[in-house]
Image: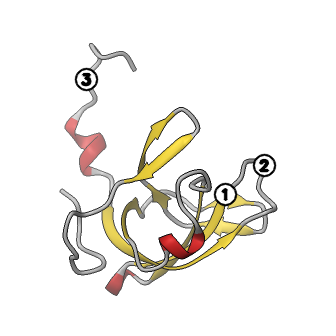
Amino acid sequence: MTHSELAPWSHFSSLDIRVGQIVDAQVFPETKKPAYQLLIDFGSMGIKKSSAQLTLDYTPDELIGKQIVAIINFPSKQIAHIKSECLVLGVVSGPNVRLLIPDIKVENGLKIG
């Protein structure tokens, strides 16, 4: 999509984007590109697994306890031996990825709108 092409509002409104808290982060050596396997607590929405290529910007210890923003209603995607159940959102700058995070602690599972 170029800058002049507009997406219909329904594309955004169909996404379920929520705040979650990383409760576990492990090196995920089975992936093609360096990544972590994450467990993320979305409150009443449950705990979901994800794989995220954050190894250049974060250590596993830095990730645990951090609140993040993720899309939770995409179909699961098989990545190596896990099914990734959400897409963690971040800002991509070359090989680096910086997480989108709330600026204050909020309740896990709150919807982004």
Do the CB atoms of the residues marked 1 and 3 lie less than 8 Å apart?
Answer: no
Residue at position x 37%, y 73% from top?
20
Q: Which residue is mark 2?
A: 32
Do the CB atoms of the residues marked 1 and 2 lie less than 8 Å apart?
Answer: no
Residue at position x 31%, y 61% from top?
101
Q: Based on the displayed image, in which of its 4 quarters is residue 60 positioned?
A: bottom right
Q: Which residue is mark 3?
A: 6
Report the amino acid beneath label 1: Ala
Label tally: 3
> Where the C terminus falls, by quadrant?
bottom left
Residue 82 rendering spot, x and y as whole percentages: 71, 69
Foreground: disc 2 or disc 3: 2
Residue 58 rendering spot, x and y as whole percentages: 53, 60
Residue at position x 66%, y 57% from top?
35
- Nearest the eye: 19 or 111: 19
Q: Based on the displayed image, in which of its 4 quarters is residue 6 positioned?
A: top left
